[in-house]
Image: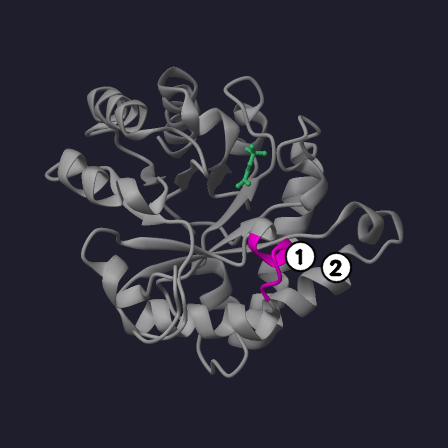
Amino acid sequence: MTSPGTRRLPVVGGNWKMNLDRNASRTLLMGLRQRLDGLDGVEVVVCPPVPWLSDAHDLLAGSTLHVGAQNTHWEPSGPYTGEVSAPMLRGVAEYVLVGHSERRWAGETGAETNRKIRAALAAGLRPILAVGERLEESRAGRTENVLHLQVNQALRGFTAMPPEIILAYEPVWAIGTGEAATPEIAQARCVAVRGMLAERFGEAAAQAVRIQYGGSVTADNIAGYAAQPDIDGALVGGASLDADAFTAICRAVAARAG
Ligand code: PGA
């Protein structure tokens, strides 16, 4: 339960995934700046593909919009062809997604997620840690076990909750499918995740953590999530590629805070 008086600034992330060429990316970045710069009551984080991060950094400089990367390697440098390290990202990004299910599907283990979080924090990046169950796990009634395992693996070895970390509850079955979780289910899962953090790090620390919902969030369904007391914004995939839709999502989330 959210204790009265707890105020967490909601955060909306736009995860562009592997989409948009350079021109389209620049157009979207400029459109977002125009529409969202200065919006109070929400933190906005735009996560373009790696080659466009430095454009994002330059085009959003001096605005209230933040730049995030979609992934990082855990080593600071070395013989890892095609990989990008957290200290490299630090020059152009403030946030980094870690543990996204599309990375877990590509083979990322819980231990690697943990190493990536450590690398991100060491480099001064703010990790957005995604957790979520697959359809068969949900059907088997294993959702909370899966979330517990993912949270504990990702945060293994931490004795205090790093305040830079944001969590995103993203049921895998809801990502890119149009089958969004109901706001009530998303709220219940965010409460469960907060409870797991409270078990590990204490109630006060858990209450301070921002937990987003992600999975088929649109301009049409965001109000339902924004109204939930334990959902602190959204991680948006498909709808983040459309300046108007993403703007409407950010505004709806900001409106709840106001
Ligand atoms: P979606 O993606 O909004 O397209 O479902 C969400 C995500 O993967 O973060």
**In front: 96, or 52?**
52
Q: Quadrant of ligand 1?
A: top right
Q: Is residue 4 visible?
A: yes
Q: Is 24 included in the stretch rendered in magenta? A: no
Q: Which residue is mark 2?
A: 144
In the shown orientation, is residue 194 left or right of residue 38? right
| Alpha carbon separation for disc pair 1 and 2 | 7 Å
List the residue tagged with mark 1.
192
Instruction: Give the image quarter of residue 249.
Output: top left
Q: Amino acid at mark 2?
A: Glu
Q: Residue at the location (21% across, 51% down)?
A: 92
Dot 1 amino acid type? Ala
Q: In the rendered view, tell whether residue 254 sits above or below residue 97.
A: above
Can you tell me whether the CB of the residue at mark 1 lies under 8 Å from the nearest atom of ligand 1? no
Picture coordinates of residue 142 (x, y %)?
82, 58
Residue 184 location (% of width, % of height): 69, 36
Asked if disc 1 and disc 2 are in contact, CB closer than 8 Å, the reply is yes
Give the structural element (helix, strand or loop) at label 1. Answer: helix
> Measuring 57% from the left and 37% from the top, which residue is drawn there?
228
Residue 87 horizontal/vertical position (percent):
25, 67
Callout count: 2
Q: State which region is magenta.
A: 103-108
Residue placed furthest toward the left: 62
Relative height, residue 155 to residue 168 (above, below): below
Q: Quadrant of the C terminus?
A: top left
